Image (cartoon, coloured by chain):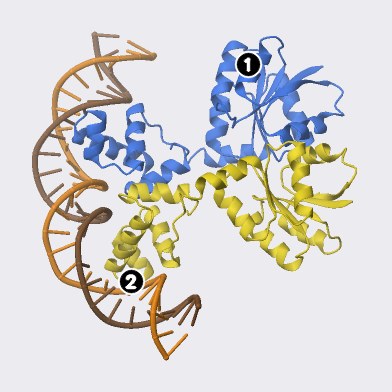
Chain colours: A blue, B yellow, C brown, D orange
Amino acid sequence: MIRLFIIDDHYMIVEGIRSLLQSEKNIEWLGHAMTAESCMAFLQHDLPDVLLMDVNLPDQSGIDLCKVVKTKYPKIHIIGLSSFNQQSFIEKMLENGASGYVLKNATSLELIAAIETVMEGDIYLSHEAAIVVEKNQNSKIPIITRREKEVLLLIADGLTNNSISEKLFISPTTVDTHRKNLLAKFEAKNTASLVKMAIMHQLI
Amino acid sequence: MIRLFIIDDHYMIVEGIRSLLQSEKNIEWLGHAMTAESCMAFLQHDLPDVLLMDVNLPDQSGIDLCKVVKTKYPKIHIIGLSSFNQQSFIEKMLENGASGYVLKNATSLELIAAIETVMEGDIYLSHEAAIVVEKNQNSKIPIITRREKEVLLLIADGLTNNSISEKLFISPTTVDTHRKNLLAKFEAKNTASLVKMAIMHQLI
DNA sequence: CACACAATCCCCTAAAAACAGGATTTTTAC
DNA sequence: GTAAAAATCCTGTTTTTAGGGGATTGTGTG
C-alpha cells in the first residue's frame, strides 16, 4: 500500500488526481494541502510515502518547499507537478531532492507509473519533461553570482551604472565589470537582449 | 438541463471538473476535447450551452479559438479557464466574446455559480480574477502601433537602430523615433526597462 | 597551502542610446 | 474630404554602454 499525499492550490487538479487514482487499490489517499504551511503541519503527525507537489504554491515556492521537506523527512519520495515543462523548474526540483516530475496533462497511467517508479527509489520524468531536459541540456542556463544577480535586477529596472553604483555603494567601474560579465555569460549583445534572456530564463 | 462541454489539454483538470460536477443533476456532461481542432469537430454535430475553455491550448490560443467559436456559434456561452489571473488574458477573452473567466483553483461552488450565471446571459468573473481586473485598470497597458511592435521585438532581440533600419528598409533616424515613442509610452527610462515592461505586459 | 572564483577597482576608445528640438508624407477613420 | 494618427525623415548634443585591456583583495575548497 502506497501512502500518498498531495499539495496543490488548484482544487480542480487535486480533485482530478483523486478521481484518476480512485480505482487504484494499492494507493492510499491521505489527503491534500493547498499551502506549504498546511503541508508542513500535516507532515508533523503523518508521513506519506509519496508526496505530489505543485511547483507553484501561493505561500512558498514548491522548489524551496521540496528542499525543506527532504531535509526534515528524507524518506519521502517527492514528485514535482507543474503545467510548465521548463527545464529550469525540472532541474531545480531534482536538485532539491525530488524523485520525479510530472506534467499536469499527464494521463492516469503516467501518474501511476511515476508513483510506482519513485517508490522503488528511481527517478521518473514525464515523457515531455524528459524531452525538454534532453533538448535544453546544451542551451544551459548561465550560472551567475549573488552580486551579478543584484546588478542584473537593477539593470532591468532601468538604472544606469552610476545609479547602481550609488545604490550598492561600489564604484561605477565595478558595476560595469559585472555588466560585462553578465553580457558574456548570457551571450547577449547588449542590455536589451540581456534583460530578455534573463526573464526568459526566469532569473528576474 | 445545462449541456456542458470542456476543452482543456490537462487531463487532470478535465477529470477534476467532471468529478466536481458529478453530483450536479442539472448539468449534462457532453464530453471534452484536448485541442482546438477536435473541439471544432465536436461542435459540428453537437452544440453545448456552456463551453469551458482553457486559455492555453496546444494547437491554438484559447483566446483566438474563443473568437472563432463565438462567430460560428453565437449562442454558446464560453467560460475562460486558466491558472493565471493576468488581466491581459481575462480582458482578451472577454473582448473575444467570452462570458466568464474562472481560475483553476476555483471551488466547485464557484464553478457552478459561473456556469449558472453565464447561462442567464450575465458575465461571471472569478473572485480573484475580478480583483486583478479592478486593480490593474489604472496601470494600463500602453497602446502601441504595428510598426512600433515590430521595432520593439527587434530591440528585444538585441538589434541596434542601424541593424533594425536595414532589416525594415527604413532610415536609422526613423527607428530612433519609434524607439523614443516606445520609451515614452512605456514610461521607461531606457531600453532595459522598456524590454522588461514589454515582457511583463505580454507584448513580447 | 595553492588555486579558483567572486568582488572590487582602474584606464582607454568607439559605438550606441537618450534627449531635444523639428518636419513631411502616408494611412486610417469619421 | 478632412482631420487625426502613424510612419517617415532630419540635425544636433550629452550620456551611457560596449569592448579591449589589466589589477588587487578576500574567501572558500580540495
Residue at coordinates 70% horizontally, 55% vertically from top-left? B99
Q: Quadrant of residue A142?
A: top left
- Rendering quarter of residue B147: bottom left
Residue A185 is situated, as x and y percent measured from the top left of the image, at 36, 38
Q: Which residue is mark 1?
A: A40
B137 lies above or below D25: below
Label 2 is placed on what type of residue?
Answer: Ile
Query: Helix or strand or loop: what does disc 1 sit on?
Result: helix
Do callouts 1 and 2 mark residues in contact (Cβ within 8 Å)? Answer: no
Quarter-of-image position of residue A183: top left
Q: Chain of mark 2?
A: B
- Find residue A192 and report its horizontal and vertical position in percent: 35, 49
Q: State whether residue B84 appears in this view.
A: no
Report the disc number at residue B170.
2
| Three-letter residue code for mark 1 | Met
Q: Which numbered tag is attached to residue A132?
A: none
